[in-house]
Each structure stands twice: as structure tokens, then as C-alpha cells.
Image: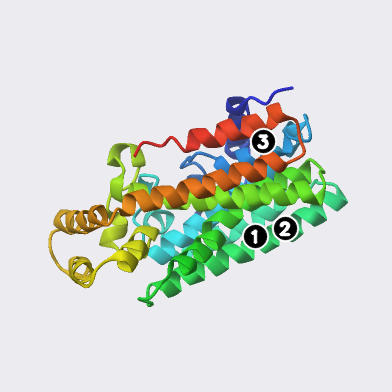
């Protein structure tokens, strides 16, 4: 039976809407319902269920554990927003702004606990394998976040440093999402490894795409302020490569633009002009596409029906067509 992505997405959203995280005190649980209700692509639980579909036609039984991944993802976003002092999430007020930081911390903590709770009900062997893989992923996400924080105080961040950070902070969870589908579908360790590597490579590619869209995207379609990374002096792949390739004069211009107090639009324009001169857009696109190609190579090695692997491939390819 062929999986229907839209039907699966509806089932995920229905489960999120109907799930009762808790009631009292309302100040603790209302932020969770608010955060989970902000929407999003639900890419991670979809990836879990489409991966499980490679080995099982009964993926309806796996809705709750797939939602656990989405709850964990939103927990990390809630805490990231606090650390970044971000005012908006998906165009809406962040939890710590709408309530307060202490409430956001506590609500996020409960979300982590509730993510584990959603795994309850799996059989003993599957539950053990799930928790081991989930814990490994959760630690990696925290390691990646700490590296990202460290980078704020380090000037000489290399491409290798950056790729290590996004592999941990962003890609590890996509890797776990895909591997979880293999665990739920009770496939062998080799298939699980290929699925994890597929998700990790996709995650790195998606982060590079985000870096690119932050500079060259259409603000109405991207969903974020274009140039925000430049204004924040964030050490993205683009900035790292520009500093690596720049002549002494260009490097001085780049650093002066980033450190200046000029109008934001002029700062973004000045930095983008240097990126254009150094062909940074093309370099980023090449690196991004290399990781997407590697991801699909890993997926092709999974021992599962071709038509089911095609469903995952088509789903992920649609995510690659975001307007630039």
C-alpha cells in the first residue's frame, strides 16, 4: 500500500492537536500548546513515518512516537529562542516574550519529558533501541548548540568547524528521525545506518540552504528577515568562505561592514556585494547540492521496495524547491 504524504501529515497534526500535555498549572502547559500550535512543516515526524513505511504498512501505529520527535524539536526551539533572545518564531511571538523566560524554561523541560512519554507503548526491544538512539541524538543536539555559542567568541571558525557544529545541532535530529522509522519498522542495523546517514546529509544540506536563503531568499517566501544572519554577524558557511577567499582589501571591507553602525539595509547590501564578487553563492550551492546527492546515495542503498523509497525521495525533493 502506497503512503499518502498529505494523509500522514493530517494524522500527525491531528495527534498534536488532540494530545493532552497537561492541565495544571495552566501557566506551565499553555505555552506548550501554543508552541506546538505554531505549525511548521512537520518534516521530522513525516520522515520517521515515511522511513517506517519502507518496512511496514501499519504506520498508523507509529504516530505517537513520530510526534515525540516533533515535541523534542520544538523543545529545542523554545530554549534556543531564549538563548538567542528571539522575539519571533514562525512569525509569532516567542514563548519567553509572550509569557516570561522562567516559564519558557520550565515548559521546555516538560516538553522533553513528554517526548519520552510518547515512546511508551512500544514493545520492549523497540523501546530500548529507540531510547538509546534518542539519547545519543539529544546529547549531540546540545553539543552542537554549545559549539554554536562558542563560535560567537571565536574569530577563526573554519569550514570544518562549522560543518561539525551543524551536523550536531541540526542534522543529528533529522538523522534520528529517519533511523527511528527503521527502528519502528524493525529493520536491520545496516538499513538503520543508511537511513541515519541519509537524514544527516539532508540536514546539513538544509542548513546550508537556510544560510543561502538568509542572504539571497525572497523574504515573503523564506519566512524570515533576509539578511538577519549578516546583521547578527553570524558565522554561517557564506561568511566563513568569504573570509577564507577574500583578499586583504576585501577582508577589511567585509569586517568594516559587519562592525559598522550603518543602516541595516546598507550593511546587508555591502556584505552581499562582497559575497557576489567572491562567488560565495555558487560555492554554497555546490556544497549544499553535494550533501543532498550524498543523502540520496545513502537512501538508494536501503534494502526496501523502490516505490517506497521514491516516496521519501519525492517528499524531500519538494523541500528542496523552496523559493530562493
Determine whether the residue tagged by mark 3 lies in a helix, strand or loop.
Answer: helix
Residues under numbered marks 1 and 2 in contact, where contact means CB atoms less than 8 Å apart: yes
19 lies above or below 129:
above
Q: Quadrant of residue 136?
A: bottom right
- Crowding at dot 3, Cα within 10 Å, few <14 / some 14-19 / many 20+, comes out as many
Sequence order check: which comes first, mark 2 or mark 3? 3
How far is disc 3 from disc 1 in space, using C-alphas?
A: 19 Å
The residue under label 1 is 137
User: Residue 4's quadrant in the figure?
Assistant: top right
Q: CA distance from mark 2 to mark 3?
A: 18 Å
Residue 258 at x, y percent in the picture? 22, 66
Residue marked by disc 3? 50
Proximity of marks 3 and 1: CB atoms separated by less than 8 Å:
no
Q: Residue at x 35, y 58 (%)?
A: 238
Secondary element type, mark 2: helix
Q: Give me the residue at 77% from left, 43% from top.
A: 184
> What element does badge 1 sit on?
helix
* Residue on which the image places disc 2: 133
Where's residue 251, x and y in %?
Answer: 23, 69
Residue 150 picture location, percent across and down: 44, 75
Q: Quadrant of the N terminus?
A: top right
- Tell which of 276 and 152 is nearer to you: 276
Q: Residue at x 18, y 59 (%)?
A: 267
Quick one: quadrant of the C terminus? top left
Amino acid at each position: 500500500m502506497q503512503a499518502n504524504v498529505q494523509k500522514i501529515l493530517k494524522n500527525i497534526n491531528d495527534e498534536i492537536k488532540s494530545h493532552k500535555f497537561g492541565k495544571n498549572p495552566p501557566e506551565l502547559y499553555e505555552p506548550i500548546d501554543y508552541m506546538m500550535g505554531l505549525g511548521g512543516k512537520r518534516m521530522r515526524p513525516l520522515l520517521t513515518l515515511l522511513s517506517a513505511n519502507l518496512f511496514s504498512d501499519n504506520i498508523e501505529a507509529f504516530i505517537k512516537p513520530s510526534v515525540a520527535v516533533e515535541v523534542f524539536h520544538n523543545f529545542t526551539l523554545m530554549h534556543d529562542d531564549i538563548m538567542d533572545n528571539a522575539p519571533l518564531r514562525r512569525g509569532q511571538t516567542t514563548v519567553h516574550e509572550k509569557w516570561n523566560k522562567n516559564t519558557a524554561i520550565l515548559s521546555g523541560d516538560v516538553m522533553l519529558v513528554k517526548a519520552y512519554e510518547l515512546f511508551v507503548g512500544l514493545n520492549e526491544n523497540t523501546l530500548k533501541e529507540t531510547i538509546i538512539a534518542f539519547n545519543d541524538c539529544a546529547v549531540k543536539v546540545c553539543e552542537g548548540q554549545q559549539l554554536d555559542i562558542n563560535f560567537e567568541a571565536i574569530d577563526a571558525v573554519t569550514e570544518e568547524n562549522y560543518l561539525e557544529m551543524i551536523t550536531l545541532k541540526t542534522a543529528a535530529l533529522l538523522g534520528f528521525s529517519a533511523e527511528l522509522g527503521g527502528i519502528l519498522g524493525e529493520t536491520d542495523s545496516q538499513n538503520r545506518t543508511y537511513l541515519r546517514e541519509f537524514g544527516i546529509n539532508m540536514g546539513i544540506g538544509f542548513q546550508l540552504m537556510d544560510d543561502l536563503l538568509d542572504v539571497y531568499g525572497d523574504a515573503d517566501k523564506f519566512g524570515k528577515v533576509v539578511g538577519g544572519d549578516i546583521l547578527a554577524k553570524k558565522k554561517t558557511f557564506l561568511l566563513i568562505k568569504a573570509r577564507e577567499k577574500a583578499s586583504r582589501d576585501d577582508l577589511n571591507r567585509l569586517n568594516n561592514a559587519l562592525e559598522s553602525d550603518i543602516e541595516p539595509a546598507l550593511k546587508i547590501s555591502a556584505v552581499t556585494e562582497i559575497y557576489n564578487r567572491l562567488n560565495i553563492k555558487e560555492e554554497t550551492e555546490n556544497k549544499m547540492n553535494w550533501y543532498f546527492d550524498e543523502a540520496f546515495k545513502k537512501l538508494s542503498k536501503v534494502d526496501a521496495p523502490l516505490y517506497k523509497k521514491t516516496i521519501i525521495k519525492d517528499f524531500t525533493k519538494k523541500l528542496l524547491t523552496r523559493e530562493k
